Image (cartoon, helix red, strand yellow):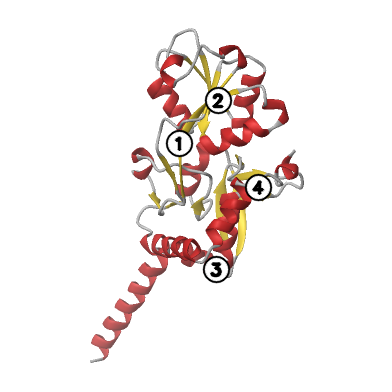
Amino acid sequence: MIKGYWSILLGIVALLQVQMAHAGAIDEAVRRGVLKVGTDPNYVPFEMTDKQGRVIGFEADLLEEMSNALGVALEWVPVAYTELIPGLLGGRFDMIGSGMTVTQERNLKLNFSDSFIIVGQTVLLHPRLAGKVSSIEDLNEAGYRIAAADGTTGEAAARRFLGAAQLRSFATEEEGVRQLVDGRVDAFIHDAPYNLIALAKPQNRELLALEQPFTYEPLAFGLPKGDYDSLNWINHFLNQIAQDGTYDRLHDKWFRDTDWLSEIE
């Protein structure tokens, strides 16, 4: 009887150890008291750095609401966009919150929550192309120089749709737009919300735009593969804020109002 008792007890201990070893990101954040989120804070208006060095934006506010609902602090872990997935897989942070588009390739490496917004790629043009370019197809020529941010779906879209053109990748979206303003490239490809805000900035107002998105891209939070408990919690959270008005309030704050521009310029 004693031998059987110890066998059962050891089995329970082993099971608890396995469960602890596989604790999900949300459970781990609650245990730690901090939700660590990897981000590249250069995606206006989703996540960006204000004049005081704080990460602000639409997705940033969503994650603040999420951390409040969990009863934990929110800690940002800034990394280059190309280091987001390696950083998550390496355990540097609990999840990715950086305007990441759900793609089949990325979904092989990590799991995604439900989408919190749908965007698409659009094109900004140098003024010299007025009357010459009216569609993405018009740019698919060897003489055109196309800018995109390194590791983004804008870069992937440029490779897919503009194989004949010259693609130049830059570390940040801001650098890509700056190259366009300076006339060193002919077009810049990125997500529609970012390009729309970029056009509103005084230094960029001479630029032209092809405003119709030519791709379909759902943005979501990225988590380690197999962390279904965390996905379940986050998806319920997204549904809750969609129903109680929180989502609409934050969306209007960042996509209808422009008062926040003074915080980053």
**Residue 258 - label:** none
Q: Report which residue position mark 4 lands on.
A: 257
Q: Nearer the viewer, mark 1 or mark 2?
A: 2
- Type of amino acid under label 1: Gly
Q: CA distance from mark 1 to mark 2?
A: 14 Å
Q: Is residue 155 left or right of residue 199?
A: left
**Residue 209 - label:** 2
**In this view, 168 is above or below 47:** above
Disc 3 and disc 2 in contact, CB within 8 angstroms? no
Q: Is residue 241 left or right of residue 17?
A: right
- Type of amino acid under label 2: Ala
- Type of amino acid under label 4: Asp
State the residue at coordinates (51%, 66%). 244
**Residue 25 vs residue 181, the one in the foreground:** 181
Label 4 neighbour load within 10 Å: few <14, some 14-19, many 20+: few
State the residue at coordinates (66%, 22%). 206
Give the secondary structure at mark 4: loop
Residue 51, image x, y percentages: 76, 44
Residue 245, image x, y percentages: 53, 63
Q: Report which residue position mark 1 lands on.
A: 120
Q: Is residue 239 visible?
A: yes
Q: Nearer the viewer, mark 1 or mark 3?
A: 1
Disc 1 and disc 2 in contact, CB within 8 angstroms? no
Residue 30, image x, y percentages: 53, 68
Q: Quadrant of residue 73?
A: bottom right
Q: CA distance from mark 4 to mark 3?
A: 25 Å
Q: Given the current orientation, which residue lies at the most extreme top position?
A: 143
Image mark count: 4
State the residue at coordinates (46%, 60%). 238
Q: Report which residue position mark 3 lands on.
A: 69
